[in-house]
Amino acid sequence: MSKESYNFFKKLLATPSPTGYEQKIQKVVKTRMSQYADSIKTDLHGNVIVSLNEKAPRKIMLAGHCDQIGFMVRYIADNGFIYLTPLGGIDLKVLQGSTVLIHNRKGKVKGLIGKTPIHHEKPEDRKKLTVNWDSVWVDIGAKDRKQAEKKVELGDPVTFELNHIDFDNGMIGGPGIDNKAGVFVVMEALRLCKGKKLNFGVYAVSTVQEEVGLRGAGTSSYGINPEVGIAVDVTHASDNPGYTKKNEAPVVLGNGPVLHRGPSINPVVDEYLQKTAKKNKIKYQISPGGRLLPNDTSAIQVARAGVACGCISIPNRYMHTQVEMCSFKDLQDAAKLIAKFIQDLPKSANFTPR
Ligand SMILES: [Zn+2]
C-alpha cells in the first residue's frame, strides 16, 4: 500500500470526530477523496457520500462510520473543574487518569481527568469501583469558573487525546480505531475501483452518529437507495487474555478481515464475498452471530424495501477504550476484498435469497 494511503489513515486517527461533531473528519475525507471520486456530496445529516460510476443503474453502498465515542461538557463548576456527559458507549472504568482534548470553537484545550489519590481513599473504596459521571471531572488548570469559561463552553465536544502508537507487526494502538478503520477501508476500496470497468455504481459513505443508534447509515441508505450494502466496522478480537475460547468466535489481529454470518447478512452477498476472498487468496475469518449486528449493517438492511447486506469487520482489541488496537494489514486486506468483490460482480448478479 502506498504511503499516501497510510498517511490518510493516520490523519483520520489524528482528527477528532465525537458523535454529532463529525465535520472535521468529513473534511479530511473529502479532501483526500477528491482525486479519486466522480463526485462527493454531503447530505443534510452530515454523511459524506463519495461516488464512482454514477451512471450505472445498480448501486453498491459501502459504509464506514466516522464518529468516535467521546463526551460533551455538561457543567463547569465554580472552582473551574469541568464535568462531562458521554457521547456513545464510554467505559467509565477506564477514564480516571486519562488525558483529554476539549474541542472549542477555535481549536483544542488539553485537560486531565483527575482522581482522588489512592492514599486518601477509604480502605473499602480502594477495592470497589465507585465511578459515576459526577465523580469524573476534567482539570484544565483553571483557577475558577470564569477562567475556565474563557476557553470552554457548555456543549463543547471532548475526546481522548488523539495519540497513536505504531507497534511491531503492523499493529497500531490508540483511541478511535472504532471506526476510523472502517472509513479508511471503504474509501480505500473505492480508490482501488477507480479506472476499472464496473457493472455497478459505487457509493462509499463516511456515515455519522453510528454510536448513538446507526443513524447516518439509515439516512444515507435511504438517500442513495442501493441494491447492495457493505458495512465496515471493527469487531472484538478474542486473541487476548480477556477472553475464554468457547464463548467467542476465534478472531485474531492480523489474520484477515472478519466476515459476519447471521440474520443481518444476505446469503448471496456472503457467498460472493467468500468466493472472492478464496479466488484472490485473501485470508479471512468468520464470525457467526444469531442477533442483529450492532452496526450500520442492520440499518442499511431494512432501508426502504430492503438492501442485500454484507458486513466486513476489522479485528480490534480493547474496544471503546482509549487504547484500542488493530493490525494495518487487516485494513488493507479488507479494502482489497471489497474492491475485488465489486469489480468481479457480473451484470447478471441476483441477490434475492433463493
Ligand atoms: Zn463502530
Image (cartoon, helix red, strand yellow):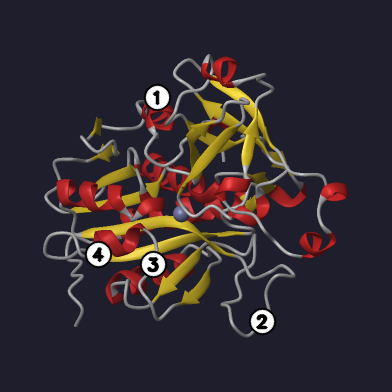
Callout 4: few (<14), some (14-19), or many (20+) C-alpha neighbours within 10 Å?
many
Quadrant assignment, res 154: top left
Q: Is residue 200 visible?
A: no
Helix, strand, or loop for circle 4? helix
Q: Nearer the viewer, mark 2 or mark 1?
A: 2
Helix, strand, or loop for circle 2? loop
Which of the labelled discs sits on residue 31, or is there none? 1
The three-letter amino acid code for the residue at tag 1 is Thr
Q: Quadrant of the N terminus?
A: top right
Q: Are marks 2 and 1 in contact (CB under 8 Å)?
A: no
Dot 2 or dot 4, earlier in sequence? 2
Residue at the location (32% across, 71% down)?
264
Which of the labelled discs sits on residue 273, or is there none? 3
Dot 2 or dot 3, earlier in sequence? 2
Q: Nearer the viewer, mark 2 or mark 3?
A: 2
Q: Quadrant of the C terminus?
A: bottom left
Helix, strand, or loop for circle 3? helix
Dot 2 or dot 1, earlier in sequence? 1
Looking at this view, is 25 or 89 the one in front?
Answer: 89
The residue singled out by tag 2 in the image is: 245
Rounded to the nearest whole Å, what is the CA distance between mark 2 and mark 4? 30 Å
The three-letter amino acid code for the residue at tag 4 is Gln
Q: Are marks 4 and 3 in contact (CB under 8 Å)?
A: no
Give the answer, above or below, for where 222 lies relative to 295: above
Q: Is residue 331 visible?
A: yes
